[in-house]
């Protein structure tokens, strides 16, 4: 298996920017970005990141606002917070040395998968990586479902038996590339596969049965309503989400989810009282946009408002600023808010 796989990889590997060398910092950043994000999406983000933060030292010294701004649009923002925390630990507690042992696994955001990827690619440790692509290849190759924790342990043992001791990182990247480029979820290109002659599901014509595809859960839809509160100088309020919440550290228009039984206007009035301790007068609706996350969909509604009573207090936000439309690009916002800003700009 391994020789055929590595020969295929040598001939077909794509020139990814993180494959220029085996610097553990560069590999780490790429693997975090590639979690739950397509390669084509990651490449421009990665190149911009390496231009701005070419070393772990520069990242550790950076302002979290700059880190989040550079991450803007990649989603799963906790990844960016964890990267920043890990960089600070490496510089401040590990004397700037990128760990090449179990210490690495204990750092924020570095689980079994990223640990194995860094250890194998940067340090040639024979530790298999197991992501969705590898599970799919393994499931078809051995004609076995790998679903439970016990199943994954069995897959890891099988991969440990196969992994190249001399080229562990290349073996892991070859497995991931094979799953992404050839052994695809739908319409796999088995005729192009370098290991099809030993693939049990290919030989037995059971490819469509592997891996098991669980039924997709219905994704809930929520109405979120926000206020565009403008003053006499054409400045409007943005608030910063608490770090520990979803989209933590990002800026947004103040507001929140509409509760059951509320109208959109009632929900906005309640949310702004809870968040900023103000009463509002709603003037007009500016628009609505839709956005999908991995676990939910939202309809984001915006209303133009003015403060009717009360003095602004930061009750449920981390920070607050008054900005103009020209300032938007200085702050990191969720993608849904950018959609909304475009809609507001058309009003």
Image: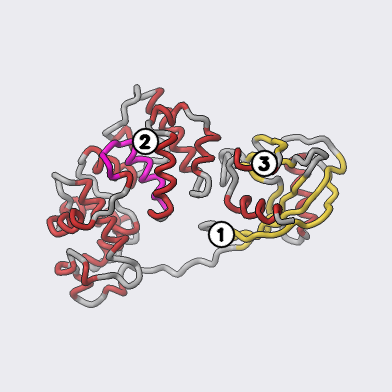
Q: Secondary structure at mark 2?
A: helix
Q: Residue 269: image x %, image y %?
A: 79, 50
Q: Quadrant of the N terminus?
A: bottom left
Regarding residue 258, the answer to whether it shows in the image is: no
Q: Residue 344: image x %, image y %?
A: 71, 53
Regarding residue 89, the answer to whether it shows in the image is: yes
Q: Which mark is residue 338?
A: none
Q: Quadrant of the C terminus?
A: bottom right
Which residue is the site of mark 3? 326
Please, is residue 244 above or below residue 141 in the view? above
Q: Earlier in the sequence, mark 2 or mark 1?
A: 2
Name the residue rendered at 47%, 67% in the picture: 216
Quarter of the rendering containing residue 165:
top left
Asked whether the beta carbons under mark 2 and mark 1 sit within 8 Å of each other, the answer is no
Which one is nearer the viewer's eye here, 99 or 150?
Answer: 99
Name the residue rendered at 76%, 53% in the picture: 303
Which residue is the site of mark 1? 292
Q: Which residues are magenta?
A: 19-36
Which residue is the site of mark 2? 106
Q: Secondary structure at mark 3?
A: helix
Real-space CA distance between mark 2 and mark 1, rounded to the nearest whole angstrom? 32 Å
Name the residue rendered at 21%, 49% in the picture: 170
Residue 156 colored in magenta in the image: no
Q: Earlier in the sequence, mark 1 or mark 3?
A: 1
Mark 1 surroundings: few (<14), some (14-19) or many (≥20) residues within 10 A: some
Name the residue rendered at 85%, 49% in the picture: 281
Mark 3 surroundings: few (<14), some (14-19) or many (≥20) residues within 10 A: few
Please, is residue 195 above or below residue 46 in the view? below
Q: Residue 152: image x %, image y %?
A: 29, 56
């Amino acid at each position: 298996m391994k020789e055929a796989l590595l020969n295929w990889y040598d001939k077909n590997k794509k020139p990814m920017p993180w494959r220029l060398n085996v610097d553990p910092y560069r590999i780490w950043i790429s693997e975090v970005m590639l979690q739950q994000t397509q390669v084509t999406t990651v490449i421009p983000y990665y190149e911009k990141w390496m231009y701005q933060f070419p070393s772990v030292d520069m990242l550790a010294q950076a302002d979290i606002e700059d880190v989040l701004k550079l991450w803007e649009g990649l989603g799963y923002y906790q990844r960016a917070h964890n990267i920043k925390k890990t960089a600070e630990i490496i510089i401040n507690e590990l004397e700037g040395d990128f760990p090449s042992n179990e210490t690495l696994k204990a750092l924020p955001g570095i689980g079994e998968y990223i640990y194995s990827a860094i250890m194998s690619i940067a340090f040639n440790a024979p530790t298999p990586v197991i992501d969705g692509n590898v599970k799919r290849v393994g499931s078809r190759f051995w004609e076995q479902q790998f679903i439970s924790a016990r199943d994954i342990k069995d897959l890891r043992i099988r991969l440990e038996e196969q992994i190249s001791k001399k080229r562990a990182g290349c073996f892991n990247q070859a497995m991931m590339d094979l799953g992404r480029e050839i052994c695809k979820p739908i319409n796999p290109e088995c005729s192009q596969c370098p290991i099809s002659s030993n693939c049990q599901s290919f030989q037995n014509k059971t490819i469509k049965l592997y891996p098991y595809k669980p039924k997709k859960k219905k994704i809930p839809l929520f109405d979120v309503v926000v206020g565009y509160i403008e003053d006499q100088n054409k400045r409007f309020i943005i608030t910063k989400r608490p770090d520990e919440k979803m989209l933590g550290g990002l800026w947004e228009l103040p507001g929140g989810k509409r509760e059951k039984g509320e109208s959109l206007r009632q929900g906005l009035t309640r949310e702004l009282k809870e968040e900023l301790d103000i009463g509002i007068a709603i003037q007009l609706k500016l628009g609505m946009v839709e956005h999908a996350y991995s676990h939910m969909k939202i309809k984001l509604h915006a209303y133009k408002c003015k403060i009717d009573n009360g003095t602004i207090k930061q009750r449920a936000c981390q920070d607050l600023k008054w900005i103009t439309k020209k300032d938007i690009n200085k702050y990191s916002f969720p993608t849904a808010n950018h959609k909304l800003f475009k809609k507001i700009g058309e009003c």
